[in-house]
Image (tube, helix red, strand yellow):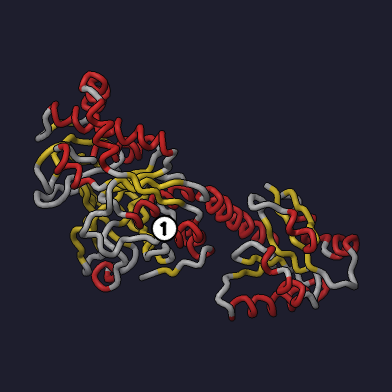
Amino acid sequence: MIVNLITFASFLHKQASIRVSHEVVLSELEKHFTVNLVDYQDAEQLGPDDFKLVFIATGGVEQLVVQYFETLSHPVVMLADGIQNSLAAALELSSWLRNRGLRNEILHGEVSVIVQRIRTHYQNFQAKRSLFGLRIGVIGSPSPWLIASGVDYLLTKRRWGVEYTDIPLERIYELYDKITDNEVGASCAAFASQALACREATPEDLLKAMRLYRAIRRVCEEEKLSAVTLNCFKLIEQIGTTGCLALSLLNNEGILAGCEGDLQTIFTLLASRVLTGKVGFMANPSMVNIHNHEIIFAHCTIPTKLTEQYIIRNHFETNSSIGIQGVMPTGEVTIIRCGCECLDEYYLSTGTLMENTNYLKLCRTQIRVKMDSPVDYFLKNPIGNHHIVLPGNHEEALNEFLQANTCKRVE
């Protein structure tokens, strides 16, 4: 791991004396990282993939930092060990940045703490760089009921480096019609053989759903998509099959896939996976118990890799085609959703998955989660419908990342 320290020192100090003066902190950091001291005048030579911190080596550099502000990474993270009035200068700069609404942090004090914070900032940097250039396919327009889940494509690309691309449903229909039952028969048999049971769905339903999966998978390959969101209900009207199976299998394979053309939630899935390595369960909060801090999350599809076992069902709303009832393991979970048109708000909480429920009038996969925070948010201040359930506790990592990217936490 290479840490480039963009070094600011007053004209009274030469580069050689900087290393001598700060030998204690630099030698300790070099036990953990490869440390490069980069003079601020050479900072432009570093590329976008180079991890950079600001090293305040002396006092009196405030104007220099302001002058070269555009060459710095954001948020601005400043290392200041206190030698040569460096902490005093960092404090002044921190106030200047904060007054302009710019997130910043001063690394100072115990080296072990500084090392841990550098690792965290590096993780955030890597996650943000990993998002850059990823493509999200929007197959069909978002469902008309998702009136608060839109995204400004241009602002999102500028902010996160992620590109949304619209793909007409007709392209899926054309590919779907070319795929025969014989081509997907073995895949259907394998999927069915691993299921705990098959209830309402027929073999014909499974064949049609698998053909749809193959069609969407081909488009993802042709368009080099990292994620896709699908207007499922228009598909049901046109070709008589749901996207539940397709989305489950795509998620299993690492192509993140979401329902109903929800633009905000598919980004949430993508950002969460980049940071935590985990795929999530996209679900509706379907019942809220304020007294017990509990929520029932439900949807008709789930990545089967998240389940201990699954049952092949039909789709709840239409009583047709394929739905998946997954049984998730109990234990810690993280609930997250990114919102707003430029994706600069988020909800985040942890909880415990207590049980898998089986209510008759809810979507097929259902889980009861006891939240670690009050559930009033869902009734008083929600930023949308769909939320992502991630196995495990990832609150600290996700919060650090979103805060580092100047997102507002909604509670």
Lateral position of residue 276 relative to residue 124, left or right: left
Q: Position of residue 114 (x, y in %)?
A: 66, 61
In the displayed structure, 78 sits above or below 125; it is: below
**Quadrant where the image shows the C terminus:** bottom left
Residue 307 in view of the camera: no
Say which quarter of the image contains residue 288. Answer: bottom left
Count the marks: how many?
1
In the displayed structure, 47 sits above or below 71; it is: above
Residue found 25% across the figure and 63% down from its top:
147
- In the rendered structure, which amino acid carries the disc numbered 1? Tyr
Lateral position of residue 338 relative to residue 358, left or right: right
Say which quarter of the image contains residue 184. Answer: top left
Lateral position of residue 251 relative to residue 120, left or right: left
In the displayed structure, 395 sits above or below 137; it is: below
Q: Which residue is mark 1?
A: 153
Residue found 50% across the figure and 67% down from its top:
406
Q: Position of residue 62 (x, y in %)?
A: 74, 76
Label 1 Cα crowd, 10 Å radius (few <14 / some 14-19 / many 20+): some
Mark 1, secondary structure of its residue: helix
Q: Quick one: 366 or 384, which is closer to the camera?
A: 384
Q: Quick one: 220 or 304, which is closer to the camera?
A: 220
In the displayed structure, 75 sits above or below 249; it is: below
Say which quarter of the image contains residue 199. Answer: top left
Residue found 36% across the figure and 36% down from its top:
219
Q: Quick one: 235 or 276, which is closer to the camera?
A: 235
Residue 133 in view of the camera: yes
Residue found 13% across the figure and 27% down from its top:
204
Q: Position of residue 248 (x, y in %)?
A: 29, 39
Q: Position of residue 305 (x, y in %)?
A: 33, 37
